[in-house]
Amino acid sequence: MSAAPIERRDLCDLQGPPLAAASGVLGAMGLIIQRELRLSFRRPEQLLQPLVFFLIVTTLFPLGLSLQLSLLRDMAPGVLWVAALLSSLLSLDSLFKSDADDGTLDQLALSGQSLTAIVIAKTAAHWLLSGAALVLVSPLVAIALGIPGPVFPVMLLSLALGTLTLSWLGAIGAGLTVGLKRGNVLLSLIVLPLAMPLLIFGAGATDRAISGISSAGALYFLGSLCILTSTLAPFAAAAALRITLE
Amino acid sequence: MDSAAQAFTVEKAHVWRGDRHVLKGVSLELHSRELMHVSGPNGAGKTTLLRVACGLLRPEQGRVSWCGRPIGSIRAEFQGALAYAAHEPALKGDLTALENLRYMIGLKRRHTRAELEAALERTGVGSCAHLPVRVLSAGQRRRAVMARVLATRAALWVLDEPFTNLDAAGSALVSGLLAEHLERGGMALVVAHHELPVAGSIRRLDLQA
């Protein structure tokens, strides 16, 4: 094979359907999300671990406490939220870690795409696989904890907003700790204090809904936190990653 | 390609790692059809130099320019012209070789599936295109990495020990690819421990520990 033509003749002129058209930021983000989802579905055990953890932890509470349904119902929102925070945290460590370890993160940083867009795509994929999945299984847990059915919409909405906010906060923490050997403990120490407002207002919203009071205030607050973190956290996480890349 | 317009330069780059002065004012200049062979003992800062050249690491002093402009000011343009193969293959074990290429090249430019398959075929791993990378041998992974570099169609190749894990045929292949790349008007910055059997204009840069 002669040297010169490989680029032009052998590679350019072969016909085939375009696999991907990473035209612009959105195409690139779509490609990254697709890649993350595909990787995750090839390793279903990693996908299921946080969910099983969530189910088991919430099952432990009724077993360890009294069997009085009224007491259980009083504690249910708190139990649900603490378990949701902890299980989201389990998967946060791997957000950038595996990519950093095998050199993929360097390639992503050199891909010509903005690091902020890459962080947004990776975090969105992470939320779909952890937060959104958690929201979907939460009714099961809610039934087991005796949360009444009419409360479900408020509970699901608050969990969706809360887990998304947590993913954004976690992206900053994961970006800061990605270069460390045992970063996961530090990650919890960074993220959990920041997650306290989520716990207070998330559990509060569900609690108020159970008591029959309007939970709109708490939901608005969760919504504003979610918007705040989703607009600012990508920049912070990208900056953190840039520091650890050096 | 105009050789003057395609110049890549690193000027007096200094990098400290804590107290250690890793890069002590390294300068290099690359034009079209030139290959810079970087060598030196372990710990001499060869990989650090490559990371500085790619823009992954900002030097404390000195500057890196592409076509006469600092790479920080033309980040997207420079990265579009760059193919970096680090010591880590940056391949995902759970994805097939083709998928690995597709997700990385897709971020850089439009491409067709046939193009990627042709690149894998060219580097001798066409038959493994649909196998998950974790079942490939270290040498086959290295070949897949070269396929990625090839498919990037970049002007500047930055390769960190591209001959690692390769058999004789594989080494000849990489040398051949480098020679073709130079002939096309490309340029390459290569870290290697032995002599490069590449035809073309080769310059040496010896780093001292």
Image (cartoon, grey):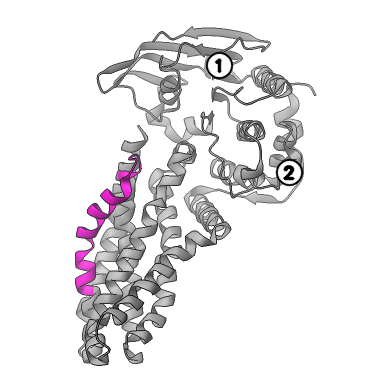
Labelled pair 2, 1 in contact (Cβ < 8 Å) = no
On the picture, is A227 further left or further right than B126?
A: left
Q: Quadrant of residue A196?
A: bottom left
For residue A157, above or below residue A185: below
The quadrant of the picture occupied by the N terminus of chain B is top right
Amino acid at dot 2: Ala
Q: Main secondary structure of the magenta part?
A: helix
- Give the magenta part as a residue range: A177-201
Q: Which residue is mark 2?
A: B114
Residue A137 screen position, x and y as percent: 43, 76
Disc 2, SS: helix
Per the model, the C-alpha gap separating discs 2 and 1 is: 31 Å
Residue A240 screen position, x and y as percent: 30, 43
**Residue placed at 35% from the left, 43% from the top?**
A178
Residue A7 screen position, x and y as percent: 70, 30
Disc 1, SS: loop
Nearest to the observer: residue A88 or residue B57: A88
**Residue A180 forms part of the magenta stretch:** yes
The dot on residue B192 is 1
Q: Residues within 10 Å of mark 1 (few under 14, many from 20)?
A: some
The quadrant of the picture occupied by the C terminus of chain B is top left
